[in-house]
Image (cartoon, grey):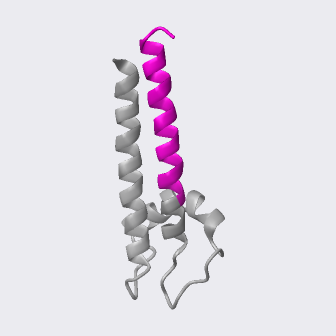
Amino acid sequence: MRELQFILVLDLLFEVFTWILVARFLLSWIPNVNYYHPVVRFIYRVTDFVVQPFRGILPPVGAIDFSPLIMFLVLRLAYSLLRRILVILVLQWAMGG
């Protein structure tokens, strides 16, 4: 079923994005990170548009930025809801209803 394969691809993309967010969160713990390194720049460029709205909800504690963690939790909940809706729609479509 192509529809279920689509959901599996979304799951994979979500997992990859989640690990990139984890990397961003862990980078905030490392002192003297070279923010000009191409890998670090990629991580920040890919995640910044999602993390930015959550910036300022909790102030940083020392050098640790908790906004990726808050965003991670919200993203997990939102994706879980979206995935359930997609699975229900696919199953209803497959059953002809």
Residue 97: give x, y in percent of width and height.
Answer: 51, 11
Q: Position of residue 71 (x, y in %)?
A: 54, 63
Query: For this view, does 16 lie left or right of residue 89?
Result: left
Q: How many marks?
A: 0
Residue 63, position in %: x, y? 49, 87
Q: Would residue 97 be found to the left or right of residue 55 on screen?
A: left
Please tell me whether residue 30 is drawn above or below residue 91 in the rendered image: below
70 to 5, vertically: above or below:
below
Please give the name of the residue rendered at 39% of the width and 66% of the height, measured from the top-left corner: 22
The answer, for residue 38, to whether it is visible in the render is no
Counting from the top left corner in percent of width and height, residue 62 is at: 51, 91
Q: Residue at x 41, y 53 (%)?
A: 17
The part of the image, by quadrant, that contains residue 28 is bottom left
Q: Which residues are magenta?
A: 74-97
Q: Please name whichever residue, 50 or 32, is drawn nearer the observer in this view of the structure.
A: 50
**3, above or below 53, in the image:** above
Q: In what quadrant of the picture does the N terminus appear? A: top left
Residue at far top of view: 96
Q: Image point 41% across, 38% down: which residue? A: 10
In this rendering, the answer to whether 15 lies above or below 56 is above
Magenta stretch secondary structure, dominant:
helix
Residue 94 part of the magenta-drawn span: yes
Based on the picture, tell me whether residue 75 belongs to the magenta stretch. Answer: yes
Tell me if residue 73 can be seen: yes
